Image: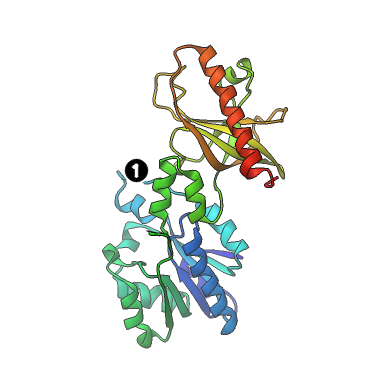
Amino acid sequence: MKIIHGAANFQYIKDRPALAIALGNFDGLHIAHKRIIDKTREIAKAKNLKCAAFLLDPHPVKVLFPQSDLFLLSSVAERAEKLDKWGVDYLIIEDFTPEFSALSPHSFVKDYLAGFLNVSEIIVGYDYSFGFQGQGTPKELLRWSEEFGYHVEIMPPVALGSEVVSSSLIRELILQGEVKAASVYLGDYFSRTGTVVHGEGRGRHLGYPTANLKTPPGLLLPGNGVYLTLAEWKGKTYFSLTNIGKKPTFKQDNEIVVEVYLMDFSGDLYGEELTIKFLNRIRKEKYFPEVSLLVKQIKDDEKKARDLIAEEYAKIL
């Protein structure tokens, strides 16, 4: 997959191809996003076009409402990696600035889609919006299709039970600690990647050495609590317990820490990159008046985790 930073740069590609392009922010790349990408790839193949995706960075909410507490499900790099696996030929990443946000919907279609990108097919979700204040909708894309010579495919909502799949729904589930339910809508386990940094070393003294994971700012973490997780490191995977929270037994501040205890593992992970996949929540965060009570709880957490592994997850590894 080729990544193009700025749609204007696409016009300088030698033998610039005609595109079937999916439009959206694709945060989390959940199962509804996959249907859009699959349809884009299918159309591209049928009409001898290249399959492309177009997204904005930073997320528009971050620019238009800087006071917003929006945390994203995935970084642009993570989205690019998955889009590559899904068979996208070109990823166009447009810098979302106040100036870009002021573009009228018609100017965006004229200058960007028909102009810089030479689109033949546009594939969007039913709720896609674009242009100044999000005034553009799929109806406008349809209305201008004859003027600019492209075809539009509008994908209907994807529902599981009574819920329509969306990034906002998945964010809410993850914030509530419902990582197992979120994985159904994602089509994969929710994951977070970070670097192991030095902590206070308290876990080792308690008999449960943990890797303190520094994760990128601006990305969502599950609600505070203890989770059964998978830890991926250098091509190997380990079942693990991951604690997210403020360590109320020891600390009295608001810093959120991520601590990972890799089961059946020994070794030095400082400076290494770990990817943590969240399988199930074991419990919510608790305060313990005595350290001995915390140790007992950790033992109970590990037992519950191993029981869950035997019952549901043994075949993962």
Is residue 16 among what the camera can see?
Answer: no
Residue 122 in the image, given as x and y percentages of width and height: 45, 76
In the shown orientation, is residue 301 left or right of residue 129? right
Whether 283 is drawn above or below 2: the answer is: above
Residue 118 in the image, given as x and y percentages of width and height: 47, 79
Q: Residue at x 72, y 45 (%)?
A: 235
Which element is circle 1 on?
A: loop
Q: Residue at x 62, y 15 (%)?
A: 205
Q: Indicate the amino acid at tag 1.
A: Asp
Q: Residue at x 35, y 72 (%)?
A: 108
Residue 221 in the image, given as x and y percentages of width and height: 46, 40
Determine which quarter of the picture holds residue 17.
Answer: bottom right
Is residue 127 among what the camera can see?
Answer: yes
In the shown orientation, is residue 296 left or right of residue 100? right
Which residue is tagged 1?
69
In the shown orientation, is residue 298 left or right of residue 170? right
Observer-nearest of 99 and 270: 270
